[in-house]
Image (cartoon, helix red, strand yellow):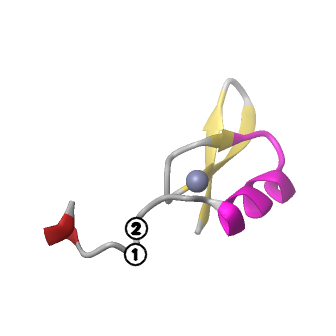
Amino acid sequence: MVSTTQKDDATWYRCEECGLLFDSQTDAEMHEENCDSDDDTPSYLQ
Ligand SMILES: [Zn+2]
């Protein structure tokens, strides 16, 4: 999911998978679709 963050009087969009910040919601959503975070990996394998 993309979450919004207020910083320096601007709205940033954060990829909740890896924490990257984007100044564009579109960019954040596009990134998230391709995010290579291993969130689907069961925690016991990490
Ligand atoms: Zn990400």
- Is 29 positioned to the left or the right of 16 in the image? right
* Identity of the residue drawn at 51% across and 46% down: 19
Amino acid, disc 2: Asp
Give the residues drawn in magenta, as a range: 22-34
Q: Is residue 4 above or below residue 21?
A: below
Confirm if mark 1 falls within 8 A of ligand 1.
Answer: no
Query: How crowded is the residue under tag 1: few (<14 C-alpha within 10 Å), some, or many (20+)?
Result: few
Quick check: is 36 in the magenta stretch? Answer: no
- Is 19 positioned to the left or the right of 4 in the image? left
- Marks 2 and 1: in contact by CB < 8 Å? yes
Residue lying furthest top: 8
Q: Position of residue 26 (x, y in %)?
A: 85, 58
* Identity of the residue drawn at 64% across and 40% down: 21
Res. 39 mark: 2
Q: Is residue 34 above or below residue 15?
A: below
Q: In terms of secondary structure, where does tag 2 sit?
A: loop
Report the magenta stretch's main SS. Answer: helix
* Identity of the residue drawn at 42% across and 63% down: 38
Query: How crowded is the residue under tag 2: few (<14 C-alpha within 10 Å), some, or many (20+)?
Result: few
Q: How many labels were placed on the picture? A: 2
Quick check: is 29 in the magenta stretch? Answer: yes
Residue 1 position by quadrant:
bottom right
Query: Mark 1 sits on what residue?
Result: 40
Amino acid, disc 1: Asp
* Identity of the residue drawn at 72% across and 56% down: 31
